[in-house]
Amino acid sequence: MVLTTISALSSLENFCITYLEQTADDTYRCSAKVGTISFKDSRDDALIAYLCCLGAWNDVTHNYSVYLDSTFLQYVSYQTNDTVLLNIANFVKMCTANADLLPVLTTDNFLYWGNHSHVVANCRQN
């Protein structure tokens, strides 16, 4: 497995297992996608593993992608900072815990949540 700009496997495990509660097998499968799938532009291919842990290919235990707007997934695919990625995982886990909060989460929701208190009440604000 090759993770490039983003820190090593430990960051992916933290994102997938600790924050999103995916299994170790899910995380391994997601890390294996890097190298078999790639972006057609300058984005870091390591982000494929992070998108996978969010459920982009619907092959993990917890599929969060159904709660995420496609533009939010695109936003995630351009991140290269471990802290931002862990904040995204924290936001997704917290803000998808209550199915009554639909519609889907957007980039604007995340940015609002990130600039204010990290509480459920701020999940759908923008």
Image: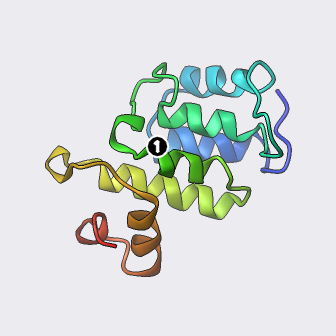
In the displayed structure, 23 sits above or below 14; it is above
In the displayed structure, 63 sits above or below 71; it is above
When asked about the image quadrant of residue 2, the answer is top right
> Mark 1 falls on what kind of element?
helix
Give percent across and percent down for residue 28.
65, 23
Q: How is the image coloured?
A: rainbow
Q: Residue furthest left?
A: 100
Give percent across and percent down for residue 79.
68, 56
Around disc 1, counting alpha carbons within 10 Å, would you say few (fewer than 14), some (14 to 19), or many (20 or more)?
Answer: some
Where the C terminus falls, by quadrant?
bottom left
Give percent across and percent down for residue 115.
46, 80
Q: Residue at x 74, y 56 (%)?
A: 80
Give percent across and percent down for residue 70.
46, 43
Q: Residue at x 49, y 37 (%)?
A: 54
When asked about the image quadrant of residue 125, the answer is bottom left
Q: Residue at x 66, y 41 (%)?
A: 12
Residue denoted by label 1: 70
Between residue 66 and residue 7, name the one nearer to us: 66
